[in-house]
């Protein structure tokens, strides 16, 4: 290599090493300065930040210097530094606003006011300038000035979405919900932003932390605007959304139906509202929504889906709270069969077929018909892998229900193997663990459950945890190596699954008679409550649940018992006061419970 090239190479290596050393030193200085600053040792932090600032004039080091100087009441130094920074960056409004704030804090109000007035009088030419000025004022908590800047910008650029959103962010920060609502109305009228954007801002208005008086005022503003501007579809959609947030589904239905008729739509808006109402257990309104679509006739694009959803409502209403009579289940079966005859057996109706099979096998003892229907569903052209797996799971459940435990277990194992990394596979593994538990293979069941406790599905993880806890509590503590009490309990669980409530009670009574002080006592009470519910013995069910809440208020099934009681008083006994009291206990005493979210939702609905 020539000498000159060797010299150049060495020069760059040395230069690179020097820059690396400087960077390392700068980093060390920054860490030390930050340490002093966090401790409130500003006198030590300032020289280090001054050195770092001199090298880069970074806004980060500038901010730390300003905060350090003001903490020590060194306003003159902070003002001089800010003037210097403003000269270096004359187009950055942040430093100008900071200078005004420093004048204010050092009792130089006239100088501060002069700066604010200049900012307000400045004839900004772009949207960016208005937003930068507004944000700088907002960051310094000069909200009224920031609002004036945004309003000036909107006069020049009335339909600019960025300016509107910046103003709404400010109003939200100010807690000015009435003007925030007015801004949303204005944007909806002019189609300035997406409906989703506006809804996200209004979520803050219709929130439990906002007073009822303010919410009522904002609701009135939206209702008046919608009535005055019936031609604005966005505003009407906003009105419907507001009613849904308030659980006022009746009003939402009226307006959704009105819009559908006005714009001659195909019922899409009603279908969406019906789906939301169904998820909120507003069955009557959901039924009205889907019935309206069905009345459009079989040629309507959403007819088939609406008919299926109507059947889902009927199923949920029948089985949600209590055990229906055989006659009621037979009526539901006929409804499903009629719909299936009309719509045909296709990939689109596979869920309908699966539910019909479930009804036939588990409630009407039509095991063979149910299995044949599911096997037909699994072979349908166009059926997804997920749909086929769900049908296979239902078949395995039916085999277990009918007493063919070996076939059920083999099918669960196959589904778990075919769907290793999704919720269907996890559900199959959970059911495998339950089969092992029913067969008194407690160690094997525990091994399967340990994996499932980390499942992505909260419901699966919760069920896995409960069964795992049941097994571990009653195998570690049981001195009898045969675990006879737990074996009886597992048989009772299988009998309950197979709708043999009387048989389950025999096993449970045997545990109570032979193991009076066993750790299964609260579990036995919980299973007896479930058996009583299946037998429609309401008095016994309430007695067992109440005993759990009184004797075992902080054990595994306490939250289950409170929730089951609350649901009974809410939906069956119609005792709203008692139900609300029980939901409140769940919310306050069991915040980590799986049921606490539902309890909180029910409680708020009842308050409203």
Image (cartoon, rainbow, N blue to C red):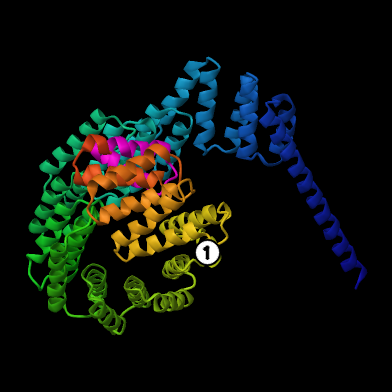
Percent across and percent down for residue 420 are 49, 72
Closer to the camera in the image, 364 or 578:
364
Which residue is identified by label 1? 442
* Residue 166 seen in the current view: no
Q: Quadrant of residue 566?
A: top left
Q: In the current view of this chain or complex, which residue is farthest to the top?
A: 107
Span shown in magenta: 580-608
Give the left or right position of residue 62, taking residue 459 as reference: right
Closer to the camera in the image, 325 or 195:
325
Give the left or right position of residue 461, taking residue 570 as reference: right
Which part of the image, by quadrant, shows the N terminus?
A: bottom right
Percent across and percent down for residue 603 are 29, 39
Percent across and percent down for residue 354 are 27, 73
Q: Is residue 81 above or below residue 308?
A: above
Percent across and percent down for residue 257 are 11, 54
Measuring 37% from the left and 30% from the top, which residue is drawn there? Answer: 174
Measuring 12% from the left and 63% from the top, which residue is drawn there? Answer: 293
Q: How would you classify the magenta stretch by its main secondary structure?
A: helix
Residue 601 is inside the magenta segment: yes
Which part of the image, by quadrant, shows the C terminus?
A: top left
Closer to the camera in the image, 327 or 290:
327
Q: Is residue 582 above or below residue 476?
A: above
- Check disc 1 and report its element: helix, strand or loop: helix
Q: In the current view of this chain or complex, which residue is farthest to the right?
A: 3
């Amino acid at each position: 290599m020539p000498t000159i090239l060797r010299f150049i190479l060495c020069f760059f290596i040395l230069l690179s090493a020097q820059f690396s050393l400087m960077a390392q030193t700068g980093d060390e200085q920054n860490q030390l300065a930050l340490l002093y600053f966090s401790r409130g040792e500003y006198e030590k932090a300032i020289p280090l930040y001054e050195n770092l600032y001199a090298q880069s004039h970074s806004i980060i080091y500038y901010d730390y210097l300003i905060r350090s100087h003001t903490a020590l009441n060194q306003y003159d130094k902070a003002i001089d530094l800010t003037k210097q920074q403003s000269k270096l960056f004359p187009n950055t409004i942040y430093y100008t606003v900071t200078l005004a704030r420093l004048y204010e804090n050092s009792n130089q109000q006239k100088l501060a006011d002069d700066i604010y007035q200049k900012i307000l009088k400045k004839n900004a030419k772009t949207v960016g300038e208005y937003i930068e000025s507004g944000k700088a004022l907002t960051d310094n908590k000069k909200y009224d000035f920031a609002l004036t800047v945004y309003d000036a910008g909107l006069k020049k650029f009335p339909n600019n979405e960025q300016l509107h959103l910046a103003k709404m962010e400010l109003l939200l920060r100010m807690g000015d919900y009435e003007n925030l609502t007015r801004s949303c109305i204005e944007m909806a009228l002019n189609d300035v932003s997406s409906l989703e954007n506006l809804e996200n801002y209004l979520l803050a208005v219709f929130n439990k932390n906002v007073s009822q008086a303010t919410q009522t005022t904002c609701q009135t503003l939206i209702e008046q605007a919608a009535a005055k501007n019936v031609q604005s579809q966005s505003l009407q959609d906003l009105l419907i959304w507001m009613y849904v947030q308030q659980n006022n589904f009746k009003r939402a239905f009226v307006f959704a139906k009105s819009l559908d008729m006005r714009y001659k739509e195909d019922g899409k808006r009603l279908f969406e509202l019906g789906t939301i109402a169904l998820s909120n257990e507003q069955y009557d309104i959901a039924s009205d929504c889907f019935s309206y679509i069905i009345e459009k006739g079989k040629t309507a694009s959403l007819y088939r889906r609406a008919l299926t959803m109507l059947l889902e409502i009927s199923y949920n209403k029948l089985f949600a709270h209590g055990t229906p009579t055989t006659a009621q289940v037979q009526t539901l079966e006929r409804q499903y069969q009629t719909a299936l005859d009309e719509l045909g057996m296709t990939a689109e109706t596979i869920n309908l077929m699966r539910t019909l099979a479930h009804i036939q096998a588990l409630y009407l003892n039509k095991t063979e018909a149910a299995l044949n229907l599911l096997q037909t569903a699994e072979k349908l052209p166009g059926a997804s892998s997920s749909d086929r797996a769900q049908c296979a799971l239902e078949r395995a459940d039916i085999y277990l229900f009918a007493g063919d435990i070996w076939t059920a277990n083999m099918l669960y194992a196959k589904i778990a193997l075919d769907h290793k990394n999704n919720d269907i596979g996890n559900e199959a593994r959970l059911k495998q663990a339950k089969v092992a538990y029913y067969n008194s293979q407690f160690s094997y069941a525990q091994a399967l459950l340990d994996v499932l406790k980390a499942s992505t599905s909260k419901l699966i993880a919760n069920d896995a945890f409960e069964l795992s806890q049941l097994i571990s509590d009653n195998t570690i503590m049981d001195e009898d190596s045969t675990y006879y009490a737990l074996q009886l309990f597992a048989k009772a669980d299988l009998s309950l699954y197979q709708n043999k409530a009387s048989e389950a009670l025999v096993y449970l009574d045997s545990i109570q008679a032979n193991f009076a002080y066993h750790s299964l006592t609260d579990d036995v009470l919980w299973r007896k409550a479930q058996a009583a519910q299946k037998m429609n013995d309401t008095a016994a069910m309430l007695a067992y649940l109440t005993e759990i809440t009184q004797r075992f208020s902080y054990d595994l099934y306490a939250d289950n018992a409170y929730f089951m009681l609350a649901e009974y008083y809410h939906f069956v006994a119609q005792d709203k006061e008692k139900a609300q009291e029980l939901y409140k206990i769940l919310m306050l005493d069991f915040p980590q419970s799986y049921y606490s979210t539902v309890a909180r939702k029910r409680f708020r609905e009842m308050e409203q």
